[in-house]
Image (cartoon, rainbow, N blue to C red):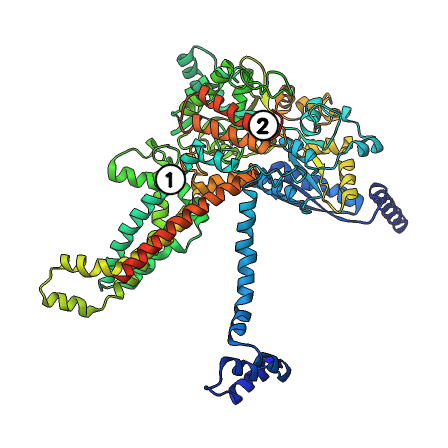
C-alpha cells in the first residue's frame, strides 16, 4: 500500500513550489518524512547516486585495482596451491619485449585501420545516398541495417561457409567478376588474404552503424543553409566541402570512436571466422589475451597484458575525445 | 506364483542395488566430450541406474570447447561433475591441483587391480607422476589416431591400374608414412565417378589441439622424443632432432600436396565430413569414430577400410582416450566411486566394447574373439601397442598452445622453416618449465 498511498499524497498534497526534499518527504510516511526533512539536498543527491557508485566500484573499479595488483605477481588461477610471488615489472617487461605480442598488435592495428577506413568511406557514402529522397528509401535503409542486427558469432560462422573455396559463394562471386577460379584461393586459409577476410566481414556487418550515425548528422543540417548557399551560387561540390562535411564531421568522428573502441577489443567474430589463424596472422590482441588468461592460465601475465591494452585504449580515446570536442566547438 | 516370482525378482533387484551403493539413491553427473562413445556410455549406464537406484545425468561438451569448459570447471572448484572422463593430458594437473580423487585406497579396498588393464592405458590415463603406482583415474576409453580409406576405390581395377602405372607399385593399405603420402598424392585432384577427389583429410586445427595431434602422427613415426632423458626436461636435440625436422617437413608437404582446398583449420568433424561426403580417399581420425563410420550407410560396410598410423623409422601412434576420474569437489563421491567400481567389472567392460566404447580391460582385449569382433579391432590393438602421448604436465595447456602455434605457423601459414619452428617450440617450453620451477 505504500506505493499507491505515496502516489496519492504526492498528487494531492504537493505544490510545484516545494523543494525536492519537501516533495519526497510528503510522499513518504510521516516518521521517514521527518527524517528526510532533516537531510540536505546534497545528502539526498548522494543517497540517490550511492547505489550506482557502489555498483561501479564493485564491478569496475575494484576489479581494475585487483588486476593491477595481480599484474605484478606470478599468480596462476589454475594453481590455487602455488605460492604467489611479487615479481615487480617482470610481466610488463616480458610482454613489451615479446615479438609475438607485437605481431598481434600489428594484426590489430591492420584490422582497426582498414575497418575504420572502409566503414567510414562506405558508411558515409551510403548515408549520403539514402539522404537523397527517393522511392523505396525506407526499405533500402532497413535492408542495409540488417547485418548489424545479427550476432557476431553467427556472422563469423556463416562467413566461414561463404569463404569456403569449394562451395563458398564469395569465391564464386570473385570468379564471376575477375575470372580467377573459385577453388584457386582461400580467403581464410591464405596468410596474405586472411587479414582482409576479417576486414571484409566486419565492414559488411558494421558499415550500417556508421551509416546510421552519418544519416543522423546529414538530417540535422538545416535546409536553409543549402538554400543560402544556392543563392550564393555555390556549386554542389563546394556545398559538400563547406557545409555537409564540416557539419557531419562530429558525427563521423563519434562513429569512428565507437567503432574504434569496439574493434580494438574484437573477439567473437574473428574467433568464429579464423580462430586467429592461419598461424597467428589474424590473432588480434583480445584473442591472444584470452589464450594467455584462460587457456594458458598465466593470470599475472595476462593481467599486465590487460593493463597495457587498457592504458593504450584509454590514452588513444582521451586524445581522440579532445580532438572531437575541438571539432564540435568550431 | 506370478506375484511371488515378481516379488522375489523385485527383492533381488533391490538387494543388488543396495549391494552396489550401500546408500541412498543419488543424482550423479558424468562429464565428457560430446561424441559417439558418449552415446554408448549413456546406454551402458542404464544398467548402473537399474542396479544402484542412482540417477545418471550427463554433461557432454563438443570437443572444440571440451578442454576449456572442463578445465575452467575444475579450476573454479565447480561441483557440476561428479565423474569426469578427462583427457589423458589433464592427469598431471588433475592430480597436482587436487581436482581428482586419488584412487589407490579405493582400488585396494574394492579389489580393482591395474594389472587387469592394458599397461599403456594405465600409464597414460591413470598415473601421476608418470609410471608410478599413484592412480587418479580408471582407464575408460582406449583410443589412438588411426586411418580409414575408401576400400571401394582402392579395389577398383581402373584406379588400381592407374596407380600401378603412376608409381609402379600396387595400391594397398600403406605401410610407411611416405607410402601414405604417395597414395594421397595419387588421389589428389583425381576424377572418380565424375567428381574431383582429394588425397586425405588430416588435422590442421589451430584453436585447441588439432594440428598437434595430427603432426605428432608423423613426428612419432620418425622417432620424435620430448626429452633426451625422460623426466629431465632436456629437450635440445630431441624435440628439434634431424628426424623431427624431417617429419615436420613431411607433414607440411602432406598438407600442401594431398589435402582438399580450404582444409586450413580442420579437426575431427571436418575430417569426418570430408570422408563421408566423398571428398577424400583417406582420412586420419580417432578410433572412437570407427564404429560409427563402419555403420555409415553411404561410406561404411564394404566401402571402408581401416589401418593404424603407418610407421617410418619406428611404429608409433598418437594416443587419444581418457580415464574416468572422481572429481574431488563432488558432493557425491561415494556414489561416484560406486560407478567406477561398477564400470571396472569385466562383464560391463565387455558390453562397453560391444556398444562402441573402447575397453582397456585385458579380459576384453585379450579375448580370442576380440580381433575379429570388428574390422578395426586388430588395428586398434596394434596401435595401442605403440602409442605415445603429449606432455601430461600440470602446465600441459600452455605447452600444447605453444606447439599449436609453432606448428600452425609453419605448416599452414608458411612462416619460417621446420627447424625454426621446433627451435622456437623448445624456447617456449623452456620458458614454461622455468616458470614451473622444473628447469
Q: Is residue B125 above or below residue A61?
A: above
Closest to the observer: A57 or B83?
A57
Q: Which residue is mark 1?
A: A163
Residue at (35, 57) in percent of width and height: A145
Q: Residue B434: give its label.
A: 2
Q: CA distance from mark 2 to mark 1?
A: 42 Å
Closest to the observer: B65 or A83?
A83
Residue furthest toward the bottom? A12
Mark 2 residue crowding within 10 angstroms, few (<14) / some (14–19) / many (20+): few
Can residue A230 be seen here? The reply is yes
Closest to the observer: B34 or B413?
B413
Quadrant in the rendering for residue A193? top left
Q: Chain of mark 2?
A: B
Give the percent coordinates (x, y) of residue A190. 37, 32
Quadrant in the picture for the C terminus of chain A: bottom left
Give the percent coordinates (x, y) of residue B229. 62, 16
Same subunit, labels 2 and 1: the answer reads: no
Q: Secondary structure at mark 2?
A: helix
Q: Is residue B337 left or right of residue A290?
A: right
Quadrant in the picture for the N terminus of chain A: bottom right
Q: Is residue B414 above or below residue B182?
A: below
Residue at (88, 51) in percent of width and height: B3
Q: Is residue B350 above or below residue A251?
A: above
Mark 1 residue crowding within 10 angstroms, few (<14) / some (14–19) / many (20+): many
Amino acid at each position: 500500500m505504500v506505493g499507491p498511498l505515496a502516489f496519492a499524497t504526492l498528487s494531492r498534497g504537493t505544490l510545484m513550489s516545494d523543494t525536492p526534499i519537501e516533495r519526497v518527504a510528503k510522499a513518504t510516511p510521516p516518521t521517514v518524512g521527518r527524517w528526510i526533512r532533516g537531510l540536505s539536498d546534497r545528502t539526498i543527491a548522494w543517497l540517490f547516486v550511492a547505489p550506482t557508485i557502489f555498483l561501479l566500484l564493485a564491478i569496475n573499479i575494484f576489479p581494475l585495482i585487483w588486476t593491477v595488483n595481480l599484474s605484478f605477481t606470478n599468480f596462476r588461477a589454475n594453481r590455487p596451491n602455488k605460492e604467489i610471488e611479487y615479481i615487480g615489472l617482470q610481466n610488463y617487461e616480458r610482454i613489451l619485449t615479446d615479438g609475438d605480442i607485437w605481431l598481434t598488435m600489428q594484426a590489430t592495428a591492420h584490422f582497426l585501420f582498414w575497418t575504420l577506413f572502409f566503414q567510414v568511406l562506405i558508411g558515409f557514402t551510403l548515408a549520403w545516398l539514402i539522404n537523397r529522397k527517393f522511392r523505396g528509401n525506407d526499405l533500402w535503409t532497413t535492408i542495409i541495417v540488417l547485418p548489424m542486427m545479427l550476432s557476431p558469432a553467427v556472422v563469423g560462422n556463416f562467413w566461414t561457409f561463404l569463404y569456403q573455396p569449394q562451395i563458398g559463394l564469395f569465391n564464386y562471386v570473385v570468379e564471376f567478376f575477375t575470372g580467377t577460379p573459385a577453388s584457386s584461393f582461400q580467403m581464410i586459409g591464405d596468410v596474405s588474404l586472411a587479414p582482409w577476410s576479417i576486414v571484409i566481414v566486419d565492414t559488411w556487418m558494421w558499415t550500417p552503424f556508421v551509416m546510421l550515425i552519418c544519416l543522423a548528422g546529414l538530417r540535422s543540417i538545416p535546409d536553409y543553409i543549402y538554400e543560402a548557399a544556392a543563392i550564393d551560387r555555390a556549386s554542389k561540390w563546394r556545398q559538400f566541402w563547406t557545409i555537409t562535411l564540416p557539419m557531419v564531421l562530429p558525427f563521423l568522428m563519434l562513429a569512428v570512436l565507437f567503432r574504434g573502441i569496439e574493434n580494438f577489443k574484437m573477439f567473437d567474430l574473428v574467433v568464429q571466422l579464423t580462430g586467429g589463424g592461419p598461424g597467428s596472422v589474424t590473432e588480434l590482441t583480445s584473442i591472444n589475451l584470452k589464450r594467455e588468461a584462460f587457456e594458458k592460465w598465466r593470470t599475472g601475465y595476462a593481467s599486465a597484458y590487460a593493463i597495457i591494452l587498457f592504458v593504450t585504449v584509454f590514452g588513444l580515446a582521451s586524445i581522440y575525445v579532445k580532438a572531437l570536442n575541438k571539432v564540435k566547438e568550431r | 506364483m506370478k506375484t511371488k516370482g515378481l516379488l522375489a525378482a523385485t527383492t533381488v533387484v533391490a538387494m543388488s542395488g543396495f549391494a552396489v551403493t550401500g546408500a541412498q539413491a543419488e543424482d550423479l553427473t558424468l562429464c565428457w566430450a560430446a561424441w559417439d562413445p558418449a552415446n554408448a556410455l549413456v546406454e551402458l549406464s542404464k544398467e548402473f541406474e537399474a542396479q544402484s537406484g542412482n540417477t545418471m545425468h550427463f554433461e557432454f561438451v563438443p570437443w572444440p570447447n571440451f578442454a576449456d569448459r572442463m578445465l575452467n570447471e575444475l579450476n573454479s572448484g565447480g561441483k557440476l561433475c561428479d565423474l569426469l572422463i578427462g583427457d589423458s593430458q589433464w592427469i598431471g594437473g588433475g592430480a597436482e591441483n587436487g581436482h581428482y580423487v586419488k584412487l589407490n585406497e579405493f582400488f585396494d579396498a574394492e579389489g580393482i587391480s591395474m594389472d587387469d588393464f592394458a599397461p599403456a592405458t594405465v600409464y597414460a590415463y591413470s598415473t601421476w607422476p608418470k609410471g608410478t603406482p599413484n592412480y587418479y583415474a580408471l582407464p575408460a576409453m582406449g583410443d589412438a589416431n588411426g586411418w580409414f580409406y575408401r576400400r571401394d576405390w582402392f579395389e577398383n581395377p581402373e584406379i588400381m591400374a592407374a596407380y600401378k602405372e603412376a608409381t609402379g607399385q600396387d595400391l594397398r593399405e600403406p605401410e610407411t608414412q611416405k607410402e601414405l603420402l604417395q597414395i594421397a598424392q595419387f588421389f589428389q585432384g583425381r576424377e572418380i565417378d565424375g567428381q574431383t577427389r582429394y588425397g586425405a583429410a588430416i588435422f590442421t586445427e589451430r584453436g585447441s589441439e588439432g594440428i598437434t595431434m595430427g603432426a605428432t602422427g608423423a613426428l612419432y613415426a620418425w622417432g620424435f622424443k620430448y626429452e633426451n632423458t625422460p623426466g629431465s626436461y632436456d629437450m635440445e636435440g630431441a624435440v628439434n632432432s634431424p628426424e623431427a625436422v624431417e617429419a615436420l617437413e613431411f607433414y607440411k608437404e602432406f598438407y600442401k600436396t594431398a589435402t582438399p582446398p580450404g582444409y586450413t583449420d580442420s579437426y575431427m568433424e571436418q575430417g569426418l565430413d570430408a570422408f563421408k561426403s566423398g571428398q577424400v580417399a583417406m582420412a586420419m581420425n580417432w578410433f572412437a569414430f570407427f564404429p560409427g563410420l563402419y555403420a555409415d550407410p553411404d561410406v561404411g560396410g564394404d566401402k571402408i577400410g581401416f589401418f593404424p598410423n603407418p610407421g617410418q623409422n619406428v611404429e608409433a601412434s598418437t594416443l587419444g582416450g581418457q580415464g574416468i576420474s572422481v572429481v574431488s569437489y563432488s558432493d557425491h563421491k561415494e556414489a561416484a566411486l560406486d560407478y567406477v567400481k561398477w564400470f571396472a567389472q569385466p562383464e560391463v567392460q565387455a558390453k562397453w566394447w560391444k556398444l562402441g566404447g573402447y575397453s582397456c580391460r585385458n579380459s576384453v582385449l585379450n579375448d580370442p574373439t576380440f580381433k575379429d569382433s570388428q574390422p578395426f579391432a586388430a588395428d586398434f590393438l596394434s596401435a595401442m601397442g605403440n602409442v605415445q602421448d603429449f606432455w601430461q604436465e600440470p602446465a600441459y595447456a600452455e605447452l600444447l598452445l605453444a606447439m599449436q602455434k609453432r606448428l600452425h605457423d609453419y605448416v599452414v601459414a608458411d612462416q619460417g622453416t621446420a627447424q625454426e619452428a621446433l627451435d622456437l617450440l623448445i624456447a617456449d617450453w623452456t620458458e614454461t618449465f622455468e616458470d614451473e620451477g622444473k628447469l
